[in-house]
Image (cartoon, rainbow, N blue to C red):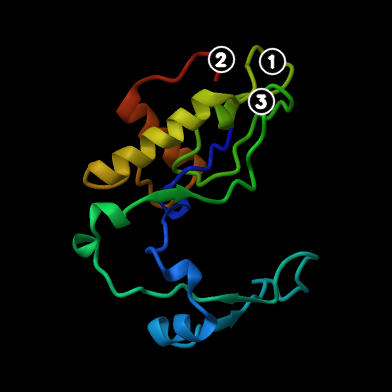
Amino acid sequence: MATDLHLANILLRLPLGMQDMTLEQLHARTGILAKEPVVREDGAPLDPGVPSELIVPVRLGLSSDEISLADSAIMTADFGEAFDPQVTQQFGAHTLLLLAPPESRFAEPGESDEPLSFPGDIWTLACTIWDVFGSGPPFEAFPVTLDEVIVEHVEMLGKLPDRW
C-alpha cells in the first residue's frame, strides 16, 4: 500500500536508446546537468542520508502532443511511504494533504476505526485520475489546511461519518 500516488509520482519511461547512452551522449542531448544545493529552511545541518545536492530535472524536448503511444509507457515512483497493511497498522497517510484519504485524518488506534488499507490507495488513485481526465484536481483548498480540505470533502461528498 502506498497512499502516495499523485501526478508527481507518475513518470514517463525514458525513450528507447536513452538507457544505453554514455554520459557524454546524454550531455549532448540534454546539456550539462544543473545541480542545486540542498538547504534546510531553518538553516540546520542536513539529516544523515539526505544528499547535499540535487540534480535539476531536464526537459527532453518533446511536448505531450509529440509523444507517441509507443513512447508513453509510464511507471510509478517514490514508494518511501509504502507499507503492508497485513503487517503494519498505520492510521495516518504521509501524502499531500489534498490527496490524503479522509480516514487518515480521523482514524485513531484503539477507537472503532480501522487502520489504513487498500481503500486509501483507491482514494489517491481516484483523485489522480480525476486530475488527469478532469479539468484539474478534485480538491483545491487554499490555503491548504486540514480544515479547508475537510470543508471541500463535505461540500463534494456530503457529511462525514458520525464517529469522525
Please, is residue 76 above or below residue 68 in the view? above
Task: Give the x, y percent position of residue 9.
Answer: 47, 51
Spatial CA span between label 3 and label 1: 17 Å
Label 1 CA crowd tier, 10 Å (few <14, some 14–19, many 20+)? few
Q: Please report whichever mark, 2 or 1, sits nearer to the chain's N-terminal start.
A: 1
Cβ atoms under marks 3 and 1 closer than 8 Å: no
Mark 3 vs mark 1: in front = 3
Q: Residue at x 38, y 31 (%)?
A: 153
Question: Mark 1 sits on what residue?
Answer: 111
Question: Mark 2 sits on what residue?
Answer: 163
Residue 37: image quadrant is bottom right
Task: Give the x, y percent position of residue 31.
Answer: 43, 87
Please, is residue 9 above or below residue 112 in the view? below
Nearer to me, 61 or 106: 61
Question: Mark 3 sits on what residue?
Answer: 85
Cβ atoms under marks 2 and 1 closer than 8 Å: yes
Q: Please report whichever mark, 3 or 1, sits nearer to the chain's N-terminal start.
A: 3
